[in-house]
Amino acid sequence: MHKLTKPLLHFYLSLASVAAFAIGWAFLAHSPKPAPLLAAPSQVQVSNSVQPTLEPIPSLNDYLNSNTSSVPVFQSPVVTFPRLRTRGS
């Protein structure tokens, strides 16, 4: 490589990266701004639709006082690992 080629290449790459950053910044600065996500609280319409009623959630006392057969019991699975063998000396 020529003695002057390496510094000129470094200068060219530095200048090109700074120019690309400035151009990208200018594009972002002049891009259209997004619309607000939520409308003003005074413009929100409240619907008066009827919600279905749900069954009440049973309490812990209901579970303790109920029959134990009605409550499902989960058993943890038994995991067995094979014995490790090296099959060598």
Image (cartoon, rainbow, N blue to C red):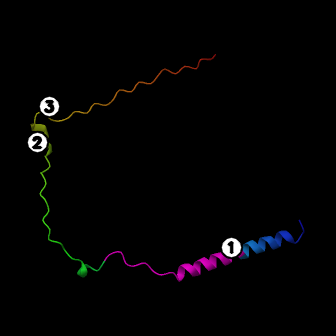
Q: CA distance from mark 1 to mark 2?
A: 70 Å
Residue 62 forms part of the magenta stretch: no
The answer to whether residue 85 is above or below residue 2 is: above
**Rendering quarter of residue 52:** bottom left
The image shows residue 65 at horizontal and vertical percentages of 9, 37
The secondary element bearing badge 2 is classed as: helix
The image shows residue 23 at horizontal and vertical percentages of 62, 79
Q: CA distance from mark 2 to mark 3?
A: 14 Å
Residue 64 versus residue 1: which sits nearer the camera?
1
Chain-order first, disc 1 or disc 3: 1
Q: Residue placed at 28% from the left, 30% from the top? A: 75
Q: Is residue 15 left or right of residue 48?
A: right
Extent of the magenta region: 16-38
**Quadrant position of the C terminus in the picture:** top right
Q: Which residue is mark 2?
A: 62
Q: Are marks 1 and 3 in contact (CB under 8 Å)?
A: no
Residue 26 forms part of the magenta stretch: yes
The image shows residue 34 at horizontal and vertical percentages of 43, 78
Q: Is residue 3 left or right of residue 63?
A: right
Q: Which mark is residue 69?
A: 3
Q: Which residue is mark 1?
A: 17
